[in-house]
Image: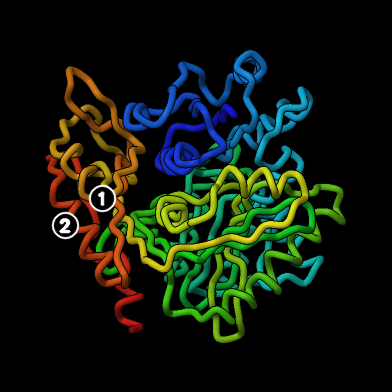
Amino acid sequence: MNVLIIGNGGREHAIAWSASNSTLVETVYIAPGNDGMAGLGVCLGLESTDHDALVQFAIQSDIGLVIVGPEIPLLEGLVDRFELEEIPVFGPRKEAAILEGSKSFAKELMHQYSIPTAVSKTFTEFEAAASYVRAEGAPIVIKADGLAAGKGVTVALTEEEAIGALHHILVDHGFGEAGAKVVIEEYLDGEELSLMAFVNGTTVVPMVPAQDHKRAYDGDKGPNTGGMGAYSPVPQFSDHDVEEAVRMILQPTANAMVKEGRSFTGVLYAGLMMTAHGPKVIEFNARFGDPETQVVLPRLESDLIDVMLRVLNGKPVQLEWKKEAVVGVVHASVGYPQGYAKGVVIEGIEEAAKEGLVFHAGTKQSSSKWKTNGGRVLLVAGTGETIETAQQHAYQVSEQITSEGLFYRKDIAHKALQSI
């Protein structure tokens, strides 16, 4: 069959890479894709916002499955459009994607169905929110309600920092409509875990867990980003810990969405805090995580397209996973997550790709040279029998890539190595 993947980032590169390895797939189309994906399929000049053109292309090109990567098309109802034309599509409808699109909705759902999460309160007015922070004290977590490209969360260690974050969101309108409301949460102590699952209604098929690194710099210092690297497996947590998270969080959430008339189909991502009192939800995403996808899919032995079709059609699924570990290191533009330059030359990508996996997120090819074209530019993934050997491999491959416009963390997977 022909497969259409919507999106142009590193996550979509990893999905396209997996799809291109499927025995069920004839041609992979990516809309819009990026220059680094060109060898895996056909990159189209169609933006993910152009729903009419995407649906028309799918009809004309006999697309057997559409996979929607990013969150914005999901919240704009792209899945609903494909379903209207009876085109098989893997992703949640608009009414279900709200689980990611509104943190206050997700919080209300969790409280209603007793799904473990941090105590929280939602505000629309600065003064009321600031008074709440002063009453609760720090540390405390401030979140813009809507989508903010992974940058709408402040883990405030002081009251001043928390109130500054509130001012940025509610008074300065730093995130526009996404900041019309803020969710203020208690600070949870523990270690984070990313757990994704293939879902259709009440069917939940969990993937292997991963852990990502949100802070920009080594030692988990600096501002929050969309993710500076990830690894899988996560040896700090046992199979029992993961099974508990599925039983207490993923399955009840899927069940709750069905009861609410918002049945979820697609990838449900739970960002968890593994606390002394068990797993608690930090956030939900309504799609594959980025950069977690780039370290989870290389471990998937099963055929990704077969898995998705089975989940869509209500057939039994048994996932097979490679035992090897994967460590992924994000190469980001200098200055990210704030302002950064574009068009800086990158050397060594082809050499690196011969030695490891290189997923493109923000690159452009111009005059036969690779150049930076985004905040997170590349993810280099290394594999190995252990986390330690996979980490060594990832950094050996990373050293092949040089650019004055890039930086990367040197300590991805450090928590795993400390736990061994």
Quadrant assignment for the C terminus: bottom left
As rendered, which of 123 and 354 lies closer to the eye? Answer: 354
Specify the quadrant of the image occupied by residue 349. Answer: top left
Give the residue drawn at x 29%, y 32%.
363
As rendered, which of 170 and 322 lies closer to the eye? Answer: 322
Q: Which mark is residue 396?
A: 2
Q: Is 380 placed left or right of 112 in the picture?
A: left
Lower position in the chain sequence, tag 1 or tag 2: 1
The image shows residue 90 at horizontal and vertical percentages of 65, 40
Q: Residue furthest front?
A: 23
Q: Vertical placement of 163 versus 355: above or below?
A: below
Q: Which mark is residue 356?
A: 1
Q: Are marks 1 and 2 in contact (CB under 8 Å)?
A: yes
Give the residue drawn at x 41%, y 65%.
232
Q: Secondary structure at mark 1?
A: loop
Q: Is 167 placed left or right of 76 in the picture?
A: left
Q: Which mark is residue 39?
A: none
The image shows residue 166 at horizontal and vertical percentages of 52, 54
> Which amino acid, by three-letter code, is at mark 1?
Gly
Q: Secondary structure at mark 2?
A: helix
Q: Estimate how packed mark 1 is, as few (under 14), some (14 to 19) or many (20 or more) residues with alpha carbons within 10 Å.
A: some
The image shows residue 123 at horizontal and vertical percentages of 67, 55
Q: Vertical placement of 129 versus 157: above or below?
A: above
How many angstroms separate mark 1 from mark 2 (CA)?
9 Å
Q: Nearer the viewer, mark 1 or mark 2?
A: 1
The image shows residue 43 at horizontal and vertical percentages of 43, 22
Give the residue drawn at x 79%, y 25%.
84
